[in-house]
Amino acid sequence: MTPPRLADSLLRFFCASHKLEEVQGDLQEEFAWQVERIGERRARWRYWWDVLGFLKPRFVCRPKPIYSIPTTTMFRNYLKIAFRTLVKNKGYSFINIGGLAVGMTVSMLIGLWIYDELSVNKSFQHYDRIAQVMRNRTVNGEVGTRPGMPIPMEQSLKTTYGSNFKHVVIGWWTSLHTITLSDQVFSKSGKFMTPEAPEMLSLTMRQGSRAGLTEPASILLSESLAKALFGNVNPLHKTLTIDNSMTVNVTGVYEDMPAGSSFADVQFIAPWDLYTASTDWINEAKDDWTNTSFEIFVELAPSVSVADASASVRNLLVGKTNVDPAQKPEVLLYPMSRWHLYSDWKNGLNEGGRIQFVWLFGIIGLFVLLLACINFMNLSTARSVNRAKEVGIRKAIGSRRQELVVQFFGESLLVVALAYGVAIVLIFLVMPLFNQVADKQMTVPFLNPLFWAIGLGFALLTGLIAGSYPALYLSSFRPIAVLKGAIQVGKGIATPRRVLVVFQFAVSITLIMGTLIVYRQIQFAKNRPIGYSRDGLISLPLNVPHYEQNRETVRNELIRSGAVLDVGESASPLTEVRSTNGGFNWAGKDPTLQINFGTVGISHEFGKTVGWTFRQGRDFSRKLASDSLGIVLNESAVAFIGMKDILGKTITWNGNGFNVSFHVIGVIQDMVMDSPYEPAKPSVFFIGPKPGKFLTMRLNPARSPQAALATIGEVLKEHLPDAPFNYTFVDDEYDQKFRSEERIGTLASIFAALAIFISCLGIFGLASFMAEQRTKEIGVRKVLGASVLNLWSLLSKDFVALVLIALGIAAPIAYYMLNKWLQAYTYHTTIAWWVFALTGVGTLVITLLTVSFQSIKAALVNPVKSLRSE
Amino acid sequence: MKRSYLGEFEEIVLLTVAVMEGQAYGVALTHEIIEQTGRSVRLNQIHAALQRLEDKGMVKSEMGEPTAERGGRRKRLFTVTAYGRRTLQEIQDVRVNLWTRMPDPFNPAISL
């Protein structure tokens, strides 16, 4: 007759071990007695009831230890032992602390980078309620999302949908403008916006007030611009001229908007009304729903959510004059919180963008830290043999397991603390370099308690993870067995150690492959045929109203000076297509086909200057008067139109102030003007009425660029004294398009290099340990006639096998992920087999070099020495 | 009054331990107390009281012999320490003292 088993095991689980026997005995005796008295069934119930009575703290708690752990004396002993171990094994200590410090530095830097990325734009007081108005339209089945808005929309948003918004601000894109202060000319970027803008952006005013834009002839300057223009003189009420046509008074100075934010380069804000009044074509667009050349920002009313406001304005463009219903126009709000990290649009939906890099770097950071932790664990497991005797002796003379656990955790925490200290110093040292590579202005937030809290938490976690093995495994040894030598310490742990090494190398190899492919992709896009020659091309934005009268003189003088070969003019810079238009028609056009061609107004010499490559036909010529109505198409446009013999055909253009019939005089090879990763936009080049917004010049290769630039500067100064000579090399502008990818690539390659470095540190330590372990074996083998080469291969082949396995695991994973990444680009490179081969061979070579140092050292030892001991 | 505090229940347990003279352990004590006082006492209460008494130093214990009815487990046998005896004695003295000083002791309702 036994009491209920379940109740019994419950009791066994809860009851303190030193109480269990008497309690269980009493319960059973009572049970036997109760069975006699009231029968088995009720006795069982009663047993349960009694057991429940014992589930109280008094019976559950273990007895208090006789002495507290650790006593200060023991603690001092642990510390001493820990330091002695560190100093005794300088190599291991260096690998442990160095590896961990590098891992921590990388992950902390990445952490700071991510923090910085996530906090972009958050400094604006109302950042969670500011949004940009965007618009979807469906062209030939594809939904495109653009920020360009027509002017009348501002009023419509205010009157019809006003309850949703606190502010509606229309403006012109941040762009370079000429600012003239008496005889000094500057070229600065700024915005023209309606007077509510400073309130919406919650500008911090240094002088003047946020209401400073209400007067049409006013301007707000950023602090740095005010400093640049006026030095220490009070800038308020001073007069400036913008673009040589708008005279304004300084009505306020605001604190620079934060670097890295979406408005970082807004160095001044001038009134929108001033811009419209002084710019004819904008003035003409005031009631035009089809001229979508402007940007609109809104600040939502406090109680309205972005989704609700977005839904309510969705159909704003439907039924508006001249808005094509076939394009299914949709208006939507793009909240500021997503501007920076989610800038990609796909089929009318906002998705992805920089956030990918945030994830990518976050994962890399975690992995690098993990690799460092793995080193730590591997080395401590490998070296556990050396500590086993210590454990045995400590136990034999009375240490209890808890104390050993405390000791070993303490040791790993000590190592981690040292590494953390080194990492803090390292971060401080590499921060400027990192900022340069990442194009950031981060500082180490030494004063931020959160930084310390997270850092210390991290370190603590690392210490606990890394120290868990020695603490839990080593402390479990039975002293007699260890001291007798019956336990083969570290034997069972060899397999997990191999797994971890394979994991380390798989991560490193994946990172290296990824970096190679990223670089290949950038190079691929860079080397793509761009359709013109960039050598010695410079681009100069012009904002002078009287340029038109001087254009011939300027061109002739520039060529005559010998500084340039030719000068061309265009409405968009060569590396951008700034205007796109529909309204094209030709004979036999499919009426449902929707067209959106890039349109670039140019001068006759533009093509010659940039070096077009003609597929068919010819360039514009001043000699033929009819060429003023000629057009040159790019290959993409011809392919889009789908006509075979397009030369001489008529194409009409009705829209945007044009209503003309053009004839095609030439077809050129596609030029890469927008994203080098995207296919070229179908584009139309025509002789513009006023193309002189950008001058493109080809420097005379016979002169040194410096001399040529100086000459150009003089000529311009003479004929266009109020135009700043603010040139850029087209080469640079083009490279700018790769900057972001290159930056990511560089960072990723640095991290990949560090990852492989940390992994190699790990196997270096392991290899030296194994060589040490097998000293006797090596000695015996040598005595029996093994050559150095034999011994070298004996010691190296294990590691080579591990790296090969890692390669086998990493390659398909890397292939899958990189292939997916590449597919996102229309123009993308392939994943060549040699990338895998190169990475594999490279990793093997590095591994062998790392391991060989130790194995050759071991193989060269005189066997007399290694066999003599004991 | 320098002696440590003894609860009423603890006092009963302690007295019973003293009465049972070296044969006191959990179940036996429970049964004895139920019999003598008519209270419904649970095993865990006795164990808790014994532990408290041991912490206070009024009883000491040692493991006894295993018996079959306990599934081969030993019982913990309690004996009263000298300090426990003295405490019981003091309690008794205080009570006797108070009783004797009572001017009009409760007389039996019916005198024979």
Image (cartoon, coloured by chain):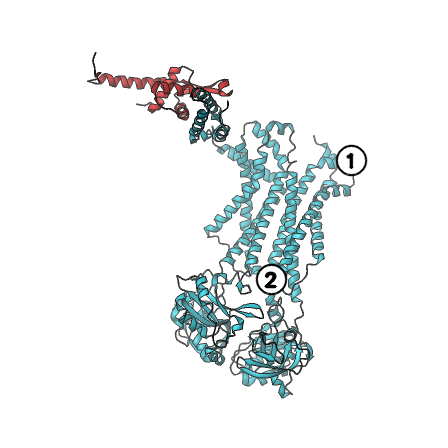
Chain colours: A cyan, B red
The disc label shown at residue A426, or none? none
Residue at left offset 65%, top offset 60% = A519
Q: Residue furthest top?
A: B112
Tell me where residue A618 sits by quadrant: bottom right
Residue A529, image x, y percentages: 67, 70
Q: Quadrant of the C terminus of chain B?
A: top left
Callouts 2 and 1 close, C-beta under 8 Å: no
Residue annotated with mark 2: A741
Q: Secondary structure at mark 1?
A: helix
Residue A613, image x, y percentages: 68, 76
Image position of A171 (left or right of A733): left
* In the image, residue A286 above or below residue A407: below
Whichever of labels 2 and 1 marks the residue nearer the N terminus, that label is 2
Q: Amino acid at mark 2?
A: Glu
Q: Quadrant of the N terminus of chain B?
A: top left
Foreground tag (2 vs 1): 2
Label 2 CA crowd tier, 10 Å (few <14, some 14–19, many 20+): some
Nearer-the-camera pick, A792 or A142: A142
Residue annotated with mark 1: A783
